[in-house]
Image (cartoon, grey):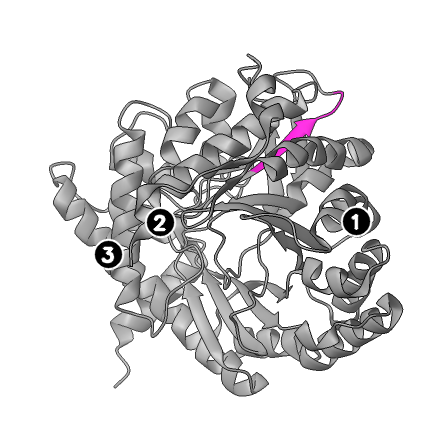
Amino acid sequence: MLNMTDIMETVTMIQDEALDIRTITMGISLIDCADGDIDRSCDKVYDKITRYAERLVETGEKIEKKYGIPIVNKRIAVTPIALLAGASGGDPIKYAVTLDRAARAVGVDLIGGYSALVQKGFAPGDTELIQSIPRALAETDVVCSSVNVGSTKAGINMDAVRTLGHVVRECAELTKDDQCVGATKLVVFCNAPEDNPFMAGAFHGPGEPDCVINVGVSGPGVVRAALANMDDTADMGEIANEIKKTAFKITRMGQLVGTEASRMLGAPFGIIDLSLAPTPAVGDSVAHILEEIGLEQCGAAGTTAALAMLNDAVKKGGLMAANNCGGLSGAFIPVTEDAGMIDSARSGCLKIEKLEAMTAVCSVGLDMIVIPGDTPAEVISGMIADEAAIGMVNYKTTAVRVIPAIGVPEGEELEFGGLFGTGPVMKVNTASPAKMIARGGRIPSPMQALKN
């Protein structure tokens, strides 16, 4: 039976509290598009993507109209392209151009999967693809890239970490006339999930089916509003319980949308990613949730503890509302994409060292952080290594997406627009890790890698 209170509560969440479905992401396997001739392979890639995703955007729009639920993005994730590049040889940039063309043909916002999985070493195609990432992201509009450099089982590939410090800088340098936007579309992972619907790190893992629908929910504003209605005397256990109940309500909407999209597209429904994904819009901020809990400003002492509680409560509440959860599932802390994080970074309350501590207890890692344009590649590699170590030891996903602001002084800002937002250039500790990074090799996996 329809409950009028529940209906009105949902309407309020959508209209006043910025509730939306952040993304419907179609995962498409391109394994059968491998070919010894790269041009034939690209033709197969284009044909398969445009055939499978032909009705993706239209379907999302129909669901929006039917249920009145905003669906912000319709996206595609594909098999890591390095797997195809290894079979075909040739310039992998051809794949990037093909992905961009196919994405535009079907009208999606972003396409992810210009990716390589190198946590244990380099297979054929991996090195060539990684070296081509800066040019691929500069020469395309909607293609996103990711590289997995470590895992709890494999350890950390420090040769890849060393290379990617230079790749991140080059991504920014090649797009310096466009706010260094190339670096916003590259994520370096440890323990990357195969079913992540969120960009820029989405790819369709080798263990996934031929085609699948994954959904990413949002809702920081809804959680903040729920906490704002609580009495100041509520203890942390009561706060956690309210977050759980709110996460349940948010996730059940995602379950509805995913089930409907799956039925309409004739593709299996994979997972709901429970992540609280913020935007630069006022009232849609994870930082503001932490401040509602009782912090003067995000970055203050106690921030990591509050974030740990929030992350755990979101998972507990969301799991009850979904058939299958996956992806990253937690609370995102991208600096430029979160209005409260932006304010905290501007005031100096939130520093990179505090963000690194926060990454140990939330989803992803050092995300959408603008750093000085003269930051050495070895320092960027060191940041990647630190985040990978946190992920490896804690058996969780961590990542780095930093944007060197080429030609922009510290204290100034880059503006990306849309969901990517804006952010100040944050100070980086530039004491050099160059000798360590130059050693290369592999950091061995920790003891928990032998859990069986």
Residue furthest out toward the top? 431
Mark toward the viewer: 1 or 2: 2
What residue span does the magenta drawing correspond to? 401-407
Quadrant location of the N terminus in the rendered image? bottom left
Q: Main secondary structure of the magenta part?
A: strand
Q: Position of residue 313 (x, y in %)?
A: 25, 52
Disc on the earlier residue, 1 or 2: 1
Mark 1 or mark 3: whose residue is earlier in sequence: 1
In the displayed structure, 343 sits above or below 73; it is: above
Q: Amino acid at mark 2?
A: Ala
Answer above or below: position of 170 versus 279.
above
Q: CA distance from mark 1 to mark 2?
A: 34 Å
Q: Earlier in the sequence, mark 3 or mark 2?
A: 3
Quarter of the figure that contains the C terminus = bottom left
Q: Secondary structure at mark 1?
A: helix
Would residue 8 appear left or right of 106 to someone viewing this image?
left
Local packing at callout 2 (Cα closer than 10 Å; few below 14, some 14-19, many 20+) is some
- Frontmost residue, 216 versus 13: 216
The answer to whether any part of residue 350 appears in the image is no
Q: Which residue is labeled 2 in the image? A: 449
Q: Position of residue 130 (x, y in %)?
A: 71, 46
Kind of residue at disc 3 = Lys
Dot 1 corresponds to which residue?
A: 136
Instruction: Report how far apart the C-alphas of labels 3 and 2 lie in the structure.
Output: 31 Å
Query: The residue tagged with tag 2: helix, strand or loop?
Result: helix
Residue 244's disc number: 3
Q: Taking 122 as reference, is 120 left or right?
A: left
Residue 192 percent coordinates (x, y): 50, 53
Q: Name the residue rendered at 47%, 78% in the picture.
A: 269
Residue 396: tell me if it is visible: yes
